[in-house]
Image (cartoon, rainbow, N blue to C red):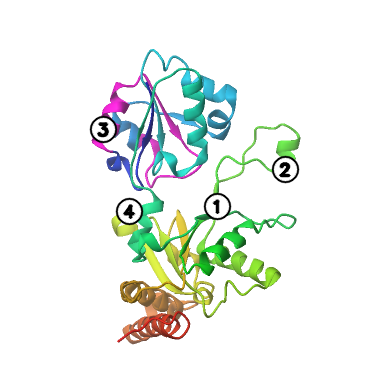
Amino acid sequence: MFYIIGLGLCDEKDITLRGLEAVKSSSRVYLEAYTSILMVQKDRLESFYGKELIIADRDMVESESGSDGILKDADKEDVSLLVVGDPFGATTHTDILLRARNLGIPTRVIHNASIMNAVGASGLQLYNFGQTVSLVFFTETWKPDSFYDRIKENADGGLHTLVLLDIKVKEQSEENLARGRKIYEPPRYMTVPQAVSQLLEIESLRGEGVLDPEKTLAVAVGRVGGFDSERILAGPLSSFLRVNPSEFGPPLHSLVIVGKRLHHLEVEYGEMFAEKLGEAVSLAGLDTEAVSEETRQSGRREGRERWRKVAREVYSVALD
């Protein structure tokens, strides 16, 4: 049996009991390590699962020769591929399932939480979300903007848009790639301010009025499911550009563009996140140890009022 097992969002304990049973029964266990990351290191997983994990990079999972290695003997014994979040969070995993089935290998998918449903922690209702988009790192010569059309389609229907921020793991520079050198760049993770900057850059080029720095609300989510390390901030797009990227904490981060079909309960739930962003804005550029509680409180109040003002005046939400 070939298993694809969702690991959830946080650490080694997020695996389901069914998933853990499959891991323990497997002769080989692979960890897919490029479409997302967990908040713990590989050795923590190995200790908890009682199994050695084989890192499966992009080449191994996506190439035919690499996937053949993963699937070898899976018709005779159990083999598992571990995936952060849910197995169907990336098309890569659908592809390897199809390859297994074409080889006559029985398959089983064991689901888990992913950002696609855990984003409800933002207070935005899941049935008000439209298409999810991915935002890649721009370069001087490559600034793809196809995501803009999907955000616009969602906006036209009043729907929220989940924006998944790019990660670069085991990437080669253009020079090393051209020379065939297996030298990899350090991992990079897109920050929320960088994402907002790129979104507004495309808006300035397209000029269709989909994203307004002062009138478009957004919610940034970091390390959802990470309990104490979870970080959620809310406010107009412009506010995210006024804070230090460190305010959002370590990766991974996502961003939600709020749609006009905004419910008053979503606004009320988001007020505490707007207060956090307002406080972060008030602390920008200051020595945080010397900042008074009055300054912090003022920032929180301004953040909440800014959030409610845009919701009321731009999104036409009736608030008490």
Amino acid of disc 4:
Gly
- Circle 2: element type: helix
Q: Which label was assigned to residue 166?
A: 1
Q: In this rendering, which labeled residue sits more in front, label 1 or label 3?
A: 3
Q: How crowded is mark 1: few (under 14 residues within 10 Å), some or many (20 or more)?
A: many
- For marks 1 and 3, the one nearer the N-term is 3
Amino acid of disc 3:
Arg
- Circle 1: element type: loop
Q: Which label was assigned to residue 225?
A: 4
- Circle 4: element type: loop
Magenta residues span 16-43
What's the CA distance linking mark 1 and mark 3?
Answer: 31 Å
Q: Residue furthest front?
A: 157
For residue 76, which quarter of the picture?
top left
- Residue identified by numbered label 2: 174
What's the CA distance linking mark 1 and mark 4?
Answer: 19 Å
Is 18 in the magenta? yes
What's the CA distance linking mark 3 and mark 4?
Answer: 20 Å
- For marks 4 and 2, the one nearer the N-term is 2
Residue 64: x %, y % from top left: 58, 24
Nearer the observer, 199 or 251: 199
Nearer the observer, 75 or 188: 75
Residue 66: x %, y % from top left: 56, 24
What's the CA distance linking mark 4 and mark 2?
Answer: 36 Å
